[in-house]
Amino acid sequence: MHFKTIFRSLKNKDMLRRVLCVLGLIVVYRFLAHIPVPLGEPATFQEAIQNLISRSDFGGFLNLVSGGGLTSFSIILVGLSPYITASIVVQLLTKAIPRLEELSEDGESGRRKINQWTRIISVPLAIVQSIAYIYILYQSTLATNTSIAFTPSTMEWVISVTAMTAGSVLLMWLGELITEQGIGNGISTVIFASIISQLPTTMATLGASLFDTSAGSLSLFGWFNLPVNPQIFWIVLGFAVAILIVLYLLVKLNEAQRIITINYAKRVHGNSAYGGIKSILPIKLIAAGVVPVIFATAFLSLPALFGQLLVTIDSENTFGTQLMQLFTAPNASNFATQYPDGITAQWFLYPALYFLLVFLFTYFYTSIIFNTKEIADNLQKQGGFIEGVRPGITTAKYLDKTVNRLNLFGALSLGLIAMLPFATDYIFILITGAPIGLSLSGTGLLIVVTVALENLRQLDSRALMVTYDDYK
């Protein structure tokens, strides 16, 4: 990255306008995260929301990517999940329906139509999710607070669902406005800002625990005492070192790629010669990015959410209780109640299924976004070939073999990254008898690293273009 070039490019009015516009849109997004849903007293839903987050790993993930919109019961509670779901559905349909596949290959006009359909599909999904969230949260509130006398009317339901749907559409629009500035993908940037916005709360919690010297202070070689809690100090130091190591590995894994050299045949047309050059085809180690982790989290959350819905309707429903026990991620908030006798075989069920689904979804999504047959056909049409490999079907088979080998290591790496929270909890259970509440979030770190690198790459590219005249 050319950071000096980036800072120099800010002297350009257009570049400065783009950067300030992106920052302003992020501020607007954070403002929306504090506007409550117009349904009764928002404070009455706090306990139910905390219960939902503690019982569902997907609830915690939604709260993370919505920038705390779930815990604050704001109008962006639904977040970008309807748009993300619609995008995944449209991508799958594009590969399954030949007409849509032809449309996606029809240049910019085709892509615009597909994007418009994605936006349209996301609206009914947002409405359905809004109704489901309000119903589950309201029933959970009634179950935990029997003294509540609030009963939403039909009009209040309509207004609340409309507000939450509008919040989701607003986030989608803000993401597209950020994308138009040309310095990063808008949807990814919004999710990135959501995760980063949780850092001040985490740092404040750590700081309060670190400087709580009621249990004693840290003695430094017997010379003097530091006004910090000794146990928390070593935990924070260990986490800081671990996060630096994980960030380094994530950057390496995200940037790792296999370079395949492409040769182009030399053509003679009249008195001019074309081709005869070499190019490269980079294949990323983790081409699927963080999508397999999101897929796996959403897939595993469905049984737990269904079980919670059954228990909300009928508190004595044993099937719903079993679903919640089996498909709830073990963490610090539910460890004492679900595992009173310590670690059991059930503790490993969720992490094992999570790792398996991440592994399988990595292969699945990579096969969707990296079509080897299409790449081989395009190379053959352009006169390109891989040295020692025949064009056409043989090239497609060679690319399939290469991608599968990369996927094996990439899927294992992605699965291990997703296992970081469970690994840290397991270590602290063995040491202290209980998991720690501040586990390393492999998913959050992966999203932050991936989006930050991509946005910096686009910012660097635009900065080089803006300052091109300075190098003449």
Image (tube, rainbow, N blue to C red):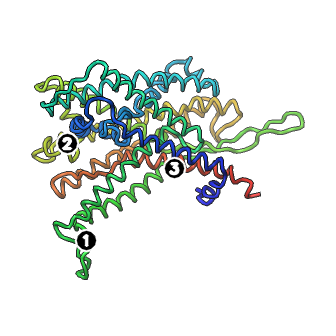
User: Residue beneath label 3, please?
Assistant: 453
Q: How dense is the environment of label 2, judged by Cα within 10 Å: few (below 14), some, or many (20 and up)?
A: many
Residue at position x 31%, y 64% in the image: 237
User: Residue beneath label 1, please?
Assistant: 227
Amino acid carrying mark 1 in the image: Pro
- Residue at disc 1, secondary structure: loop
Give residue 172's position: percent from left, percent from top: 48, 32
Amino acid carrying mark 2 in the image: Trp
Separation of marks 2 and 1 at Cα, in angstroms:
38 Å
> Reading the chain from its start, which is encountered first: label 1 or label 3?
1
The quarter holding residue 227 reads: bottom left
Residue 197 in view here = yes
Left or right of 34 in this view: 391: right
User: Residue beneath label 2, please?
Assistant: 347
Amino acid carrying mark 3 in the image: Leu
Residue at position x 24%, y 26% in the image: 306
Between 339 and 161, the one lying in front of the other is 161
Residue at position x 18%, y 43% in the image: 334
Give residue 67's position: percent from left, percent from top: 38, 42
- Residue at disc 2, secondary structure: helix
Mark 1 or mark 3, which is nearer to you? 1
